[in-house]
Each structure stands twice: as C-alpha cells, then as structure tokens.
Image (tube, coloured by chain):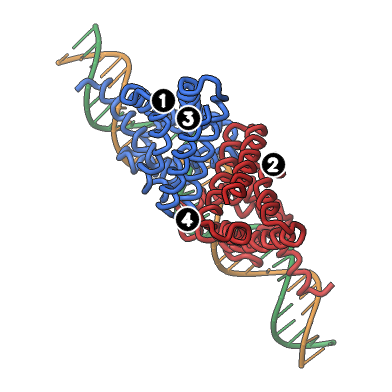
Chain colours: A blue, B red, C green, D orange
Amino acid sequence: MAAREKTTQIRQHIIEATDDLLYRKGFNLMSFSDIANTANVPRGNLYYYFKTKNEVLDAVIKHRLIRTSQMLQDWDRMLPDPLERLKRFARIPVNEMQNIIQYGCPMGSLNTELGKVQYDLKQLSQQQFDVFRSWLVRQFTQWLPHANADALAIHLLVRTQGIATMAHVYEDPQLIEREVTSIDHWLESLADAS
Amino acid sequence: MAAREKTTQIRQHIIEATDDLLYRKGFNLMSFSDIANTANVPRGNLYYYFKTKNEVLDAVIKHRLIRTSQMLQDWDRMLPDPLERLKRFARIPVNEMQNIIQYGCPMGSLNTELGKVQYDLKQLSQQQFDVFRSWLVRQFTQWLPHANADALAIHLLVRTQGIATMAHVYEDPQLIEREVTSIDHWLESLADAS
DNA sequence: CTATATGTAAGATGATCGTCTTAAATTATA
DNA sequence: TATAATTTAAGACGATCATCTTACATATAG
C-alpha cells in the first residue's frame, strides 16, 4: 500500500476511535494518552497527525457532520413522505436507546460541556445541530408550507434533547418510548390542524 | 464569635461559592485551587473542611436540595392552585434566562457531565431531579386525580431540560419564551381534556 | 495559667496533563 | 541503489492536578 494512503487511513482510524471515546468520556476527561491507547498509536506519534487536542476535536466533529449529512440524504432517498422522515428523526432515541441511557446525546452532552468554559470550541459542536435543524426545516416547509417551519424544527430538537437528558438521568428506556410516542402524536396533530 | 460557629460559617461560605463555580465551570474543570480562590480560603486550609473534591460536591448538592425544597415549599404556600404552581415551575427557564443561555441547566449539565465517567457521583445529581419530580407528581395528582401523574411530571422535566439544552446551544432567549408558552398551552389543554 | 483541641497556612508529593523534540526506521523518488 | 522525505516511537518539558504532611497560631477547657 502507498504510504500516503496509509497515512490517511491511520488518520481516519484515529478520528473514528476518538469519536467514540469523546462520546463515552467527554472532552475534558479524554486525554491525549486515552486517544493514543484507544487508537493503538504511540502517544508521541499521535502528534504527527494532530498537533493539538483541539485539532482532534475539530476533525472528529467534521467527521460527524459528514456522517450525519449522509444519513439524512439516505432518509431523503428512502422515505418519500416528509412526515415519515420526521417520524424517523423522532425515533433516533429509540434506536440509540442503550447509548443514550448510558451517555446521553453525543451532540447535546458535548455542547453542554464545551459551552461552559471552552466557548471558542462551542461553535464547533453547534454545527452538529445546524445540520439537523436545516434538514428539519426543509421537511416541515415541504410538508406544511404555511407553518413556522423553524419553530417546529426547534421544538422537535428541544423535545429530543430533553428525552436524551432525562433518559440519561433516570436510565429509563420506557421514558424514551413514551415520549417518542408523544412526539408522533404531536406530528399527526399538526397534519389535522392544517 | 465562637470558633465552632465561625467554622460552620466558613464551611457554608465555601459551599455557596463552590455552588456557583460548579455551575459555571463544571465539575471536571473546577479544581481545588479554583474553589480556594473563589472562596478566599488558602488551598491547604480547604482540606481541613473537605477531605476530597467529591466531598465538596456532596456538600454542594445537599445544599442545593435544601434550597430547592424551600423554594417549592414557598410556592406551595404562595400559590394555592396546582395549575398555577405548575406554570410557575415552567417559567423557571424564563426567570433564569441569562444563566441558562450561558451555562445551561445547573442540574442537567452536572448530571450529563458526571454520568459519563463518574458513575458513582451521578446518583448525587439525580437526587436534584427527584425533588422536582416528586413535587410535580404531587401537583398533578392533586390537580388531575385520574391522570398518570408521573408520566406528566416526567414530560414537564423533559421539555424544560430540552429548552435549557437548546437555548444554551443557540443562545436564543426567544426560543425559551416560545417553548415556555407552548408548555402553558399544553397545561391548559390538560384541564380541558378532563 | 496550662494543656489540649481546633483552625491556619504553606509547601511537598507523585501523578497526569498537553505539548514538543529528536533520533531511528521506513518509504518514496531519482 | 542512493538520497530525500515521510513516518514512527520514545521520552523530555513545564504546568497543574488532587491529596497530604507539617509546623505554627489561636481558642477552649481544666
């Protein structure tokens, strides 16, 4: 294999390993040594790929943005109906139940952590929400042209974030089921109202 | 002043200063030196009052529990109607707008932070939610005896936590206003339904 | 007043942090 | 194959962390 290729591959491997580590440990408790161990790269060598810890975070979030965009594109292709797409979004907490109960939402928990002291890094985590927000706005606009699509999108994000936080607090799977069902009913009531 | 009294007073002063610091910095980035500086107590002396950082956290959360209980008792005294009490609860994000936009919810952000790695400390932060949860259940039970009071209480907690998280993400005061109004409408719709 | 308990203040300790240097090993290029 | 560029791997660096010891000051009690 060409060396250039191998380098890119290792870099990608580090990013993906760190993605998981960041979710499970949080940014402040995730050390350079942790990253090196998890990715099976010598600590000194890690510096060759990323000069600072912030650079790793930047790469991980950029990777997340791509992954999310691809997922949403897949949904656009698979699900022709905007309502079905919105319901698919609302089901994320159900599908990711175990992780959410144990670690909360990957986006929400990161933003909450960075937003306190590392204000400069917070805008990075905000971008993760932007991808979902603009996608949700498109779905609502397409579905209900005369509604306030952005307010509806934010409302959905509010409720899913609340579900993740509270499910994490009480480690309660049923809480997720109940609240997601409630979101479904809300979505359906929107159709009736228009 | 008697020495015993003075000691208790200093201890209390440390707790209250740390309460604020914990909220603004988070647990992991709040060092013993930070606590000492904020409370104006020499670092070495701090150890006399609290043997470990976890002990400080324990004291701060116990202090929060008392403060919250007293606040809810005040509401019980001031507001005779359970619906008014629930609306008062829902207005917390409006009253604490600036803090929430800048630092998120003190309870939610702490639980999210501790829940990842320091699982042993997570149950401490969970207690903060228990106080609100049981109080909310009492209000709903009193107001709507035939409803699932716990599910309604959790739903309210979900939405307020979601508001705090998203208002913090987008630093958006209007988001709070809009979502709290939406909660008010939801509460009123419960009265109509029964 | 004296002795004992309580409170204060500074600094030591070892571990770990993010960052950086450097020299050897490997690979690409000519 | 010889030379240059890239990659690897180990360890040094100063800073800061939570924790602990110790010597000293003050207050309490007999």
- Secondary structure of residue under mark 2: helix
**What's the residue type where badge 2 is placed?**
Val
In the depicted structure, whether residue A34 falls above or below residue A72: below
Residue C21 drawn at (x, y percent):
44, 31
Alpha-carbon span between mark 3 and mark 2: 30 Å
Q: Quadrant of residue A42?
A: top left
Residue C4 drawn at (x, y percent):
70, 85
Q: Is residue B180 left or right of residue D7?
A: right
Q: Pointer 4: what residue?
A: A170
Work out whether disc 3 and disc 4 sit on a shared chain.
yes
Residue B138 drawn at (x, y percent):
61, 62
Q: Pointer 1: what residue?
A: A82
Alpha-carbon span between mark 1 and mark 4: 32 Å
Tell me if mark 1 has few (under 14), some (14-19) or many (20+) residues whose alpha carbon lies within 10 angstroms of its own: some
- Secondary structure of residue under mark 3: helix
Residue contact between numbered discs 3 and 2, judged by CB atoms under 8 Å: no
Question: Of the residues under marks 3 and 4, which one precedes in the sequence?
Answer: 4
Q: Pointer 2: what residue?
A: B94
Tell me if mark 3 has few (under 14), some (14-19) or many (20+) residues whose alpha carbon lies within 10 angstroms of its own: few
Residue contact between numbered discs 1 and 3, judged by CB atoms under 8 Å: no
**What's the residue type where badge 3 is placed?**
Ala
User: Which is more foreground, mark 3 or mark 4?
Assistant: 3
- Secondary structure of residue under mark 1: helix
User: Which is more foreground, mark 1 or mark 4?
Assistant: 1
Alpha-carbon span between mark 3 and mark 4: 33 Å
